[in-house]
Image (cartoon, rainbow, N blue to C red):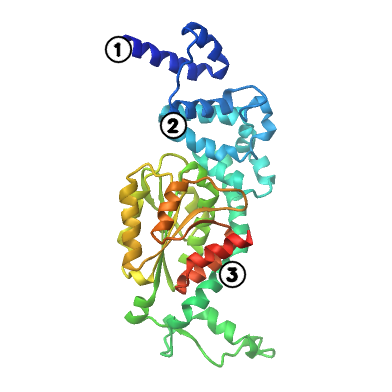
Amino acid sequence: MVQIMEETGRIKRWRLILGVESEERFISMNGNEKPGLSEEQLMMDQALAAIYNHSESEGFGQGRGAGNGPSNPKISKWLGDVRTLFEKDLVTVIQSDAIERCGLRQLIFEPELLENLEPDIGLASTLLMLKDQIPKRSKESARAFIAKIVEEINKLLEADIRRAVTSSINRRLHSPIPSASALDFQLTIRRNLKNYNKELGTIVPERFYFFDRTTAAASRQWTVILDVDQSGSMGESVIYSSIMSCILASMASIRTHIVAFDTNIVDLTEKCDDPVDLLFGFQLGGGTNIDQSVAYCQKFVENPSKTLFFLITDLEEGGNRASLMNRLKELKESGVTVVCLLAIADGGKPYYDAQMAEKVARIGIPCFACNPEMLPLLLQRALKGQDLGEFRKEFEKRK
């Protein structure tokens, strides 16, 4: 019996190595019986076929032309799947083959080409996923490319996010007590623009504005926690989340934490002063333990009624699902504003665990995918304590 099982295991391994084209031979060798692959082995087979299958109908390797490779949106998710399904030493080999076969080698290993590409968030996700494969001579070009993406998204989001925060909470954070160290330069200049003196070539302020640095003001400060899934399918969401966290971290009225997770947890809060550094701190791809990461983030909650917790994940939980649901329920019942974003991306239907999403929604936590343009409005509604369930319905109507 043991010998038969070992033989069956060997047949399945060889079937995976040789691909679907070998299946007929295995059937004839095995008494007209297919080598029955498990669900995980079928996923492995699809992942391997994507680069090693030369047919026109499958894969994104040479069979379909290398020119299709870099812009193919499947690549980022595929790389994440490979890291989940295979051992680390095999992943390195498969990724190297992917770079050769999918037209990525020329793109990543030639800085001149990378410098001339138009910013593309899908390609940025792929570059971040392959960051350890990029040679030294191309690293600066890769960083410059990511910086272009950051700049574009900043233009899209920064002013609106700052306005959303200001309109929600900043008015309460000013004091009539003058203090040079607490001077709010931006507000003072903005409110006194009408007092510009042409002769002196400067603004002559009528009134100065000062931040309230008292303990009471600190207790009114909001904490925003972004807990971000760094599995392969979440590339775009990682980029938008990172930029939003950097904008928030630069504002005195918000305490910001950003945490990345797969089966491990990385606290990236200290990198919030540089969005490019922050993005290169992510390791896209791999498994998922959401429960473990939510447990880690709970320690940042000091004042639940002034805490906004964004869980950004496709909810493909590899950890303890029951424990995750209990933690989310506990956070919500303590007074924390909890929002589950299944994706932050432009267009396209996001991939996520629909059953888990339904369970999360059932305990009263808004759970939906969001366009990046809607993030400032979502943030504003959340900070004002407005009904985010209604926001989700409005958002669905606009789509």
Amino acid, disc 1:
Val
Q: Which x, y percent locates residue 255? A: 40, 67
C-alpha gap between disc 3 and disc 2: 41 Å
The answer to whether 89 appears left or right of 100 in the picture is: left
Tell which of 104 and 287 is nearer to you: 287
CA neighbours of label 1 inside 10 A, class few (<14), some (14 to 19), many (20+): few
Tell which of 180 and 309 is nearer to you: 309
Q: Is mark 1 on a helix, strand or loop?
A: helix
Answer yes or no: do the residues labelled 3 and 1 have beta carbons within 8 Å? no
Residue 79's mark? none
CA neighbours of label 3 inside 10 A, class few (<14), some (14 to 19), many (20+): few
The answer to whether 365 appears left or right of 247 in the picture is: left
Q: Which residue is drawn at 43% across and 35% down?
A: 84
Q: What element carries label 3?
A: helix
- What residue would you read off at disc 1? 2
- What residue would you read off at disc 3? 159
**Which quarter of the figure is the C terminus placed in?**
bottom right
- What residue would you read off at disc 2? 85
Q: What element carries label 2?
A: helix
Amino acid, disc 2:
Leu
Q: Which x, y percent locates residue 291? A: 34, 49
